[in-house]
Each structure stands twice: as structure tokens, then as C-alpha cells.
Image: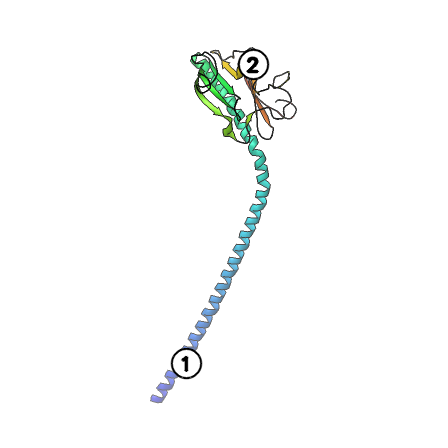
Amino acid sequence: MIKYGAAWRETLALILQQREAKSFSRSFITQQGQDETMRRQDAFTLIELLFVFVVMAIIASIAIPGFSKWLPVYHLRSAANDLYSELQATKMQAIKNNSEWAIVFDTSVSPGRYFVCSDDGANNVWDGPPAIGGDDTAREVDLSNYGSGVDYGYGSATTNATQGGGALPGDNVSFSGNTVVFNSRGMINSSAGGYVYLQNDQNASYAAGVLASGVIQLKKWDGSAWN
């Protein structure tokens, strides 16, 4: 019995050793498979990432030149629309307050600026804020804030923005004294009206004007005419 018991134990130990060896082998093979799968996944992810970078680079090469051309146009259009809005607002303030309001255009600096004024001050002359004149100033707009070379100017335009065309003003503002004054009826104190010309660094241009009747206009130079 002792001999048989010892032999049985030896046999059982051998079987257990074989099972452990097989289990370790399967575990090792499984781990190898998992590692290989992870490596394949990592490699696939890297390829995807490189593909995304290539696509982004292609899109950027197409979009950036277009954006650089679009931005100056946007800045000029914003400046022109703001001037148009300021003319409208100044006209309404004159009517609302039953008094004269004016916009004084300063072309002595570059980029230029303009001032919305509610009173012509002690000297009774519309000449801008106390720093350069004596007016009560409600707002100041500095054209340098728009960027892209926005300033007073007519760009590539060859005629003025009036219906009959003609010569462009030397300082890019055709209002007398570079000032447009609205009276309490919303009309301007000038029988001729006038225009202010704005340009950017691509020679595009807009003209914001006021007729004697108080009608405010905004025009763009299309290469051959104002529209």
C-alpha cells in the first residue's frame, strides 16, 4: 500500500505539473496575441492621425490664402457700415433733440478718425473735440481700429460717387469743412450734400454720403462705377 500510495502521489504530481505547463503556455500565447493586437491598433491609430494631419494641411493651404483676401474686405465693409449707421444715428439725434448734430471728419492723421458732436461749443464752429476744437463730442471713431489699411481714400475709383460723376475730392471728404451737419428736420445744412470715401490696403473702396434732403447713401466701387 505504501508503494502504491507513493506511486500515486508521484503520478498525480506529474499530471498537475503538465496541466500547469499547458496553462502557462496558453496564457503566454494569449498574452502574445493581445500584445500583437495592441501593436496593430496603435499602428492603425498612428496612420489615422497622420492622415488627419495631411488633410488639415491641405485644407489650410486652400483656406488661408482665401481668408487673407477676405479679411481686408470684411474690415472695410465693417467700417463703411459703421459710418453709415453713425450718419443715421446722428440724423435721428438731431430730430429727437430738436437741435443740430454733426459729424466732423479728421483727415489730418492717418489712419483718420471722425467725431459725432452734439454742440459746436463756445466758438460756434463745428471743429471737433476740445483737443482739436471746441465741440461737445458724443463719440469718436478711429479708423485704425479696423485694421487692413482702412482709412480715408477712394482706392481704385476714378470718379466721385455723385450721380454725374466727376473729380474726386483731394482729402477724400467732399462735405464743406469736412463736416456734415444735420438740422432738427433731419436735413443737412448744405445744398450740395457730400460723400466720405473709405479704402483698404487692397484699393477697394466705399462711399458714404448724404443728400441735401437728408437721405443717406452707401455705395461700393465695383471697378467701373459706384453701386
Q: Residue at x 54, y 30 (%)?
A: 75
Q: Residue at x 52, y 28 (%)?
A: 78
Number of the label disc, if any, that sits on residue 14? 1
Figure check: 9 above or below 81: below
**Marks 2 and 1: which is nearer the front?**
2
Count the marks.
2
Q: Residue at x 56, y 14 (%)?
A: 193
Disc 2 crowd rating (10 Å Cα; few below 14, some 14-19, many 20+) is many
Q: Quadrant of residue 14?
A: bottom left
Secondary structure under tag 1 reads: helix
Figure check: 184 above or below 200: above
Q: Is residue 146 visible?
A: yes
Q: Which residue is mark 2?
A: 193
Q: Quadrant of residue 217?
A: top right
In terms of depth relative to the viewer, which is nearer, 219 or 134?
134
Number of the label disc, if any, that sits on residue 37? none
Q: Position of residue 77 (x, y in %)?
A: 55, 27
The amino acid beneath tag 1 is: Leu
Q: Residue at x 59, y 34 (%)?
A: 69
For the C terminus, the quadrant is top right
Q: Position of residue 35 (x, y in %)?
A: 48, 63
Separation of marks 2 and 1 at Cα, in angstroms = 112 Å
Disc 1 crowd rating (10 Å Cα; few below 14, some 14-19, many 20+) is few
Q: Quadrant of residue 63?
A: top right
Looking at the image, residue 101 sits to the left or right of residue 47; the answer is left
Secondary structure under tag 2 reads: loop
- Residue farthest along the left direction in this orientation: 2
The amino acid beneath tag 2 is: Gly
Figure check: 205 above or below 98: below
